[in-house]
Image: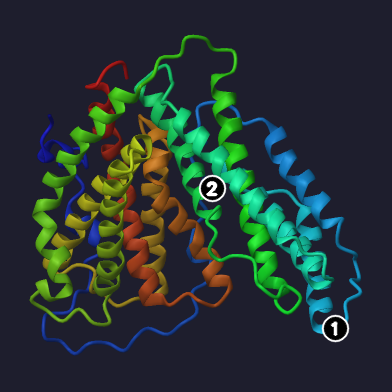
Amino acid sequence: MSSRRQFIAGLGTLGVAGLAGCSGLPLVGDEQPDRPDFDVPIGAIPAIESPASPFPVSVPDSLADSHRERATELLDRVPAAPSIPNGAVAEELRSDRERVANRLESESDEPWALDALSWWRARRGSAANIAGAYRAAIGENDPSGLVERRRTVREDLGSFTADHDYRADSVREAVLVHAPIEGLLSLSRRRASPDPGYPDDPIAEPFRAGDAVERVEVAAATLADARRLKDTHLADRSAVPTQWGALIDATDRLRFAVSETKEPVRGFLDAGLDAFDRDLDLTPAYELFTVAAPQTRSSENAFHERRDKGSHATAVIEAGETLAALEAFRTAIEGIQDGGYQEDVTIQSLERTARRAKDAIDAIRTAEYGSLAAMIGRPALSSYESVPGRIEEGYADPLRMQGELAWIELYARTVPSAAEFVVERLDATGNG
């Protein structure tokens, strides 16, 4: 097995100082500056081009069409101007119906087809919520019918999960296909939970009734997508082998790699900011650390949880995310110890950090193992894509954003090497 040093070597020749933005660093003991308070211009964050969808087969348009048609059908059950004695409920239903109807006329702008499906499931769930709330408000509720439908979904989910096998032509393909399917099954299972349930007095609590109806609707829709994606992948194929044993072997190997990679930073994860010999308050270093440490712990916990539950395809992705996070965290710690990430935050410093983050994300898009890198790099992609929206909504704290962008850069830079490391573990189990 390759050592952790071999993985670190894959990060290239970029020095810590080059990543840290160390110009104009204050000496330890200097008076701390005030918290920066200025409006971050939207132009400070350059747009990125998303990597190609990592799902290895084309997703038929019919999957999204089915959600749109079901949502339209549900919304048609609610009058445009509901006649309900409670005027406040009637107005909220009218407003919600109009909002969802407008959304059904638009198209998802998600770059990946699987994300577009998630967008359409959400619209379908909203339509079910409105229809369920309306029925409850007019006294036409059917709690027993909802309980029966939930039971059917849970039974179908159990049958699908029991029959689910990692069939694919290679172990790499098995990860790319079945990790998204496992994610859908997990989501469907959560949505099919009976808590929160249908209210005892639905007329008095129509929107709680709508929430219960929405959960079951989304559970059914999510399970349907999992089944359709599996069928799409296996269509026109015969004698597709199982990669079950190979994936279990891979997660075993990755478990040891995660443990070894964690060891150098374990003390900082345990002690937190107290592990440093300086006061980092009101510095990008403080914000960087408070973003990096929880995300690193979360990635590791998710890996072990997925592996323990037998979701081995997802566990491979989570292992890649954990390895990337641990190496990025190590680099952040070294940078902070060397005095980095403690410069004054300005519009110019944000622009520089955002450009570096964009460049690192671009490297994910062009990485050798692009599909796997795109999946492992998803935390960086999602975080970066959320920044412009927060600026527009007025939630862009400059200091916090400087630390977050620094973390995005560090994490994204480790992704291509993490993907290569994971591929080596997968290929060692059989036909890659």
Q: Is residue 410 left or right of residue 279?
A: right
Residue 165, placed above or below residue 240: below
What is the three-letter code of the residue carrying label 1?
A: Gly
Residue lying at 26% horizontally and 77% vertically, measured from the top left: 283
44, 24: nearer the viewer = 44
Of the residues under marks 2 and 1, which one precedes in the sequence?
Answer: 1
243, 363: nearer the viewer = 243
Residue 431, placed above or below residue 247: above
279, 362: nearer the viewer = 279
Can you tell which quarter of the image residue 89 is in?
bottom right
Give the farthest residue toward the top. 239
> Residue 117 placed where, x, y %?
62, 44
Q: Is residue 157 left or right of residue 418?
A: right
Residue that carries the numbered disc 1 in the rendered image: 87
What is the three-letter code of the residue carrying label 2?
A: Ser
Residue lying at 57% horizontally and 38% vertically, measured from the top left: 156
**Distance from the alpha carbon under mark 2 to that under mark 1:** 35 Å
Q: Element under label 2?
A: helix
Give the farthest residue toward the front. 144
> Residue 210 placed where, x, y %?
70, 65
Residue lying at 41% horizontally and 41% vertically, measured from the top left: 375
Instruction: State which quarter of the image contains the N terminus.
Output: top left
Q: Is residue 340 left or right of residue 223?
A: left
On residue 188, the disc is 2
